[in-house]
Image (cartoon, rainbow, N blue to C red):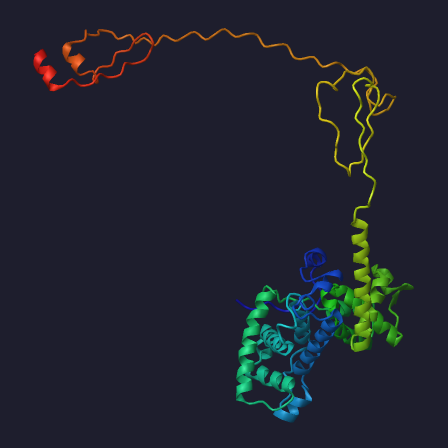
């Protein structure tokens, strides 16, 4: 069965609605507080986990590009894998998805990145596939930053083979990725933007893949923020009939600007850590307020008043539904007939006519006792019993008036038969 093709452009019309509600790889901001790396036995902060994702994506860029890493040229005299940009971008998105269900403490990101590059290269056409030995050599040189020997290469080969199967299992074989580049190109072409604007928007889309926006926002929203940044930096507005492009498309500007600020700060470690810490503080305070509001308030215990039988007109005190009913159980003593409504007023929700007293239903007529059935058996042309029948009582059964057959008589002994004969 051939591997699924990668989707670099916009999704079909029917699938756009599915990305809103049925995409299992989109998470809320509050869900990122409980990623596996922060719940590990040796937990790390969310800011450190986010920056580890950034370093892993940069490793994918170095190994997958054409130029490669300086350590490759210095120690191995080799260049990068020279993969197409869409395959490297796909590997970044799959990396973010993988670390939503795995921790950095249990998996070294250099090995995971090598397996991702090998897997994404096989998803393309035949000329894009790379030999496992090429991927192993370049990953080992870039990660070790020193010359490697045969033992190191064999270790890397085993690890990449292991993580390839583990990636497919953890990602549920879902390797189809919708990249934001196609959405950005379509909008720029519709509004007749320049090539320079499109190139700058693609750069911001690549910067967005370094962040967790790939698992928090739709690809269309990332493309909108990239176009907004490119138009602002180049001072090239996209307008039609005197209206801005985001106004015509009905895009929420506040969310677009928030994502744009996160894209601009994607390569600055201090700003990335500050953004993540600020978001974490806001989410934790919001969660704390939510728990405080849900906590039941301390109120005085209300004791219900039970009306006495002598004053049936008094109404018991209405208790709150938060408290349990401590009133006395129902009995015939306090079940009195009232001639007025229980609340004694002209309420529009209560009947105004007097309540009818309870009358028991009339007794059922006595049925005649059933007549006993005649269990006598009428046998026509019956012959009288003989001595032979009395001896063999088990062969012939006679019924009485009571309808019960007599028990068969015991077989007589041999001595008795001899005397009778």
Describe residue 161's horizontal placement relative to residue 228 as left or right: left
**262 or 45: which is nearer to us?**
45
Q: Position of residue 358 (x, y in %)?
A: 72, 14
Residue 109 falls in image quadrant:
bottom right
Q: Position of residue 225 (x, y in %)?
A: 81, 68
Residue 223 falls in image quadrant:
bottom right
Which residue is at 54% across, 76% downward?
A: 161
Describe residue 199's horizontal placement relative to residue 372 as left or right: right
Q: Quadrant of the C terminus?
A: top left
Which residue is at 27% across, 14% downward?
A: 406
Q: Position of residue 303 (x, y in %)?
A: 80, 33
Residue 202 falls in image quadrant:
bottom right
Count all numbered tags in the image, as a single digit: 0
Q: Where is residue 75 in the image (x, y as percent from the top left)?
A: 63, 92
**389 or 187: which is nearer to us?**
389
User: Would residue 273 be visible to someone looking at this image?
Assistant: yes
Is residue 336 positioned above or below 270 on the image? above
User: Would residue 209 be visible to someone looking at this image?
Assistant: no
Describe residue 15's horizontal placement relative to residue 420 as left or right: right
Is residue 301 positioned above or below 345 on the image? below
Which residue is at 55% across, 83% downward?
A: 133
Is residue 131 positioned above or below 27 on the image? below
Is residue 405 positioned above or below 189 on the image? above
């Amino acid at each position: 069965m051939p591997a699924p093709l990668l989707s670099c452009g916009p999704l079909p019309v029917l699938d756009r609605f599915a990305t809103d509600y049925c995409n299992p790889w989109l998470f809320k901001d509050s869900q990122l507080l409980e990623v596996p790396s922060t719940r590990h036995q040796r937990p790390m902060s969310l800011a450190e986990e986010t920056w580890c994702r950034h370093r892993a994506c940069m490793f994918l860029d170095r190994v997958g590009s054409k130029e490669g890493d300086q350590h490759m040229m210095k120690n191995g005299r080799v260049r990068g894998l020279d993969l197409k940009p869409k395959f490297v971008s796909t590997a970044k998105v799959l990396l973010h998805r993988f670390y939503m269900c795995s921790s950095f403490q249990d998996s070294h990101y250099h090995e995971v990145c090598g397996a991702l590059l090998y897997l994404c290269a096989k998803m393309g056409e035949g000329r894009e596939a790379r030999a496992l030995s090429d991927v192993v050599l370049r990953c080992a040189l870039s990660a070790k930053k020193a010359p490697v020997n045969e033992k190191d290469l064999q270790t890397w080969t085993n690890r990449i083979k292991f993580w390839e199967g583990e990636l497919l299992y953890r990602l549920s074989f879902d390797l189809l990725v919708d990249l934001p580049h196609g959405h950005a190109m379509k909008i720029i072409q519709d509004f007749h933007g320049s090539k320079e604007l499109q190139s700058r928007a693609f750069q911001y889309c690549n910067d967005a893949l370094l962040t967790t926006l790939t698992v928090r926002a739709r690809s269309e929203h990332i493309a909108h923020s990239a176009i907004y940044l490119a138009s602002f930096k180049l001072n090239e507005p996209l307008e039609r009939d005197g209206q801005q492009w985001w106004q015509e498309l009905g895009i929420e500007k506040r969310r677009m600007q928030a994502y744009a600020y996160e894209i601009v700060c994607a390569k600055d470690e201090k700003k990335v850590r500050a953004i993540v810490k600020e978001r974490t503080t806001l989410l934790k305070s919001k969660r704390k307020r939510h728990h405080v509001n849900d906590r039941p308030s301390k109120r005085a215990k209300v004791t219900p008043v039970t009306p006495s039988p002598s004053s049936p007109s008094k109404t018991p005190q209405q208790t709150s539904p938060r408290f349990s009913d401590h009133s006395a159980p129902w009995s015939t003593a306090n079940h009195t007939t009232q001639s007025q409504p229980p609340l004694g007023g002209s309420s529009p929700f209560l009947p105004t006519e007097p309540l009818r007293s309870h009358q028991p239903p009339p007794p059922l007529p006595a049925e005649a006792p059933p007549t006993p059935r005649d269990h006598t058996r009428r046998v026509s042309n019956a012959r009288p019993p003989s001595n032979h029948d009395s001896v063999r009582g088990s062969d012939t059964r006679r019924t009485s008036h009571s309808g019960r057959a007599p028990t068969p008589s015991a077989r007589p002994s041999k001595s008795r038969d001899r005397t009778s004969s």
